[in-house]
Image (cartoon, rainbow, N blue to C red):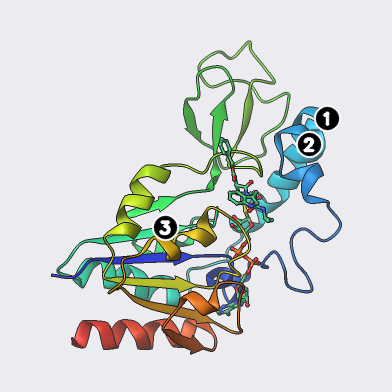
Amino acid sequence: MSNIVVLSGAGISVESGIPSFRGPDGLWEGHRVEDVATPDGFARNPDLVYEFYNQRRRALQEYRIQPNPAHIAVAALEHRWVGDFLLVTQNIDDLHQRAGSRQMIAMHGELLAARCLDTGRLYRWRGDLNASSPHPDFPDRTGRLRPHVVWFGEMPLQMAKIEAAARRADVFIAIGTSGLVYPAAGLVALTPQHCRRIECNTEQTGISDAFDEHRIGLSSQTVPQLVEELLAG
Ligand code: BV8
């Protein structure tokens, strides 16, 4: 039975109300990547970085932010597909999880988690995270927690497992990614010669040439349609 790998990016969450990184209202507007999404930026000005993620964590939990039909279709594909299935998301929101995805890797981390700088241990985190936030295991210790997010210059999570899945994919579907950020953008190049490669996006991207098929349009429409076709066999 054929194996499916899905790679999602910020575009799959745009219709849920979360701005992408490169749209006119892109998240990086007003903030240089170097200042808010790198280890150096965090070392230089931790309060700025804490606040950048606090704003996104608060926004993510607003009632208006819900999974959209694309997230739901990806979860349905996972649950109804007979072969192996892996979702790899570049997103740090929890919309795939809330839509029911389980066979998934959030390769750039998760907004709703904090990581201990000393032990690497993860903690579910829904409130603001600051230098003064008490450590869940050492309440008298502060300033030793960071957002569990992979910054530029840091290695994404579970890359060995992700690359192994890409190398044995029979179907590789990219949804809502500009294909600008590596190593995520390099995954399609790892797929075997016979792999069916499908890109779902509103426009051409930096990696469009690597795909055999393109479903141009809003993912809330193109992804349910694609999933229906795949499940119909
Ligand atoms: C690393 C968490 C090395 C933070 C993020 C070559 C190889 C390896 C690395 C590099 C390389 N070249 C350069 C690098 C360095 C760098 C990189 O790629 N830089 C780029 C900018 C050139 N990569 C890294 O630093 C990575 N780490 O390489 O480590 C290493 C080696 C050894 C040891 C240690 C380290 C780490 C990168 C991860 C950074 N963290 N996220 C946060 O979120 O705050 S990346 C962040 O930006 C997102 O997670 C996401 O991955 C990326 C944004 O990309 P997209 O998701 O694609 O979103 P974007 O807005 O760009 O595009 C949206 C798309 O959706 C568009 O195409 C649009 O048309 C479409 N769309 C919009 N609406 C819809 C839609 N489609 C359908 N329907 C719609 N409705």
Give the quadrant of ligand 1: bottom right
Q: Would residue 24 be seen by someone viewing this image from the given angle? A: yes
Give coordinates of residue 67: x percent, y percent.
Answer: 47, 69
Q: Which residue is mark 3?
A: 88
Question: In which image quadrant can residue 205 be found?
Answer: bottom right
Q: Would residue 102 be seen by someone viewing this image from the given angle? A: no
Measure how far apart labels 3 and 2 are at the Cα level. Answer: 26 Å
197 over 128 or under it: above or below: below
142 over 42 or under it: above or below: above
User: Badge 1: how crowded within 10 Å, few (<14), some, or many (20+)?
Assistant: few
Circles 3 and 2: CB distance less than 8 Å?
Answer: no
The residue sitting at the top extreme is: 140
Question: Residue 79's mark?
Answer: none
What secondary structure is marked by label 3?
A: strand
Question: In which image quadrant can residue 50 be found?
Answer: top right
Measure how far apart labels 2 and 1 are at the Cα level. Answer: 5 Å
Question: Residue 41's mark?
Answer: 2
Give coordinates of residue 194: x percent, y percent.
Answer: 27, 74
**Residue sitting at x 67%, y 26%:** 133
Tell me which amino acid carries mark 2: Gly
